[in-house]
Amino acid sequence: MKKSVISQLFSGIARLLGRGTYISGAIEGGSTTDRIMSSWNPPMTSADSSMLGQKEIVDSRTQDLQRNDGYTQSGSTLHKDNIVGHLFLFNSKPEMRVLRMNDEIWQREFQEEIESKFTLAAESVNNYFDASGNNTLTEMVRLAIGVYSGCGEFLASAEWMPKDRSRPFQTAADYRHRSGENPMAIYE
């Protein structure tokens, strides 16, 4: 049986290159014929399974770098500055179509009042948004970004605080261990 011209061409190229069959995909990174790429066969695993047994050491190394390396500290600070800045602002522009209103003056006044009240509560010296009463909302958001950039995750819980009647609202965020220690202090 005769081979087609294209088949003969590929066979000839494969013989010249010293490889079996010369078939390449459209993406160079998926090539199995390239000399460098042909021996690279990483296992297909999920992101969390690839970190099993290594997350603690990776996190501790990251914390050490964020504590002791000026470049890493500057990068983390720059990251927080670019995302949050010096003040976490609330944008409360009302959805006028849903409210079935068309009064732009009312909309502007409403937005200014809500935003100023929010900023007063969020940046209060009483730290209403923090269950432990230590940080303003801006400081908490900056902390969350620092922790996330350091170890890839951050956990906070919404706490119901009915006993403290001096608060303007009864909920707050808690991000500390119950033992009272603050393992995330290095990210502040």
Image (cartoon, rainbow, N blue to C red):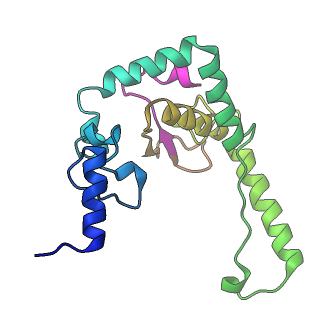
Q: How many marks?
A: 0
- Location of residue 92 in the rendering, given as x and y in whole percent from the top left corner: 72, 64
Coordinates of residue 102 in the picture (x, y in percent): 81, 86
Q: Nearer the viewer, residue 25 or 5?
A: 5
Q: Residue at x 24, y 59 (%)?
A: 11
Above-or-below relation of 14 to 67: below
Q: Is residue 102 above or below residue 168?
A: below
SS majority, magenta: loop
Q: Is residue 38 left or right of residue 3?
A: right
Tell me if 60 is positioned left or right of 134 in this view.
left
Residue closer to the observer: 38 or 175: 38
Measuring from the top left, give residue 79's x and y in whole percent: 64, 35
Q: Residue at x 39, y 49 (%)?
A: 29
Kindly identify the residue that appears in the image at 40 percent across and 61 percent down: 26
What range is drawn magenta here? 172-188
Q: Nearer the viewer, residue 41 or 38?
A: 38
Residue 123: x, y in percent? 71, 40
Q: Is residue 112 left or right of residue 20?
A: right
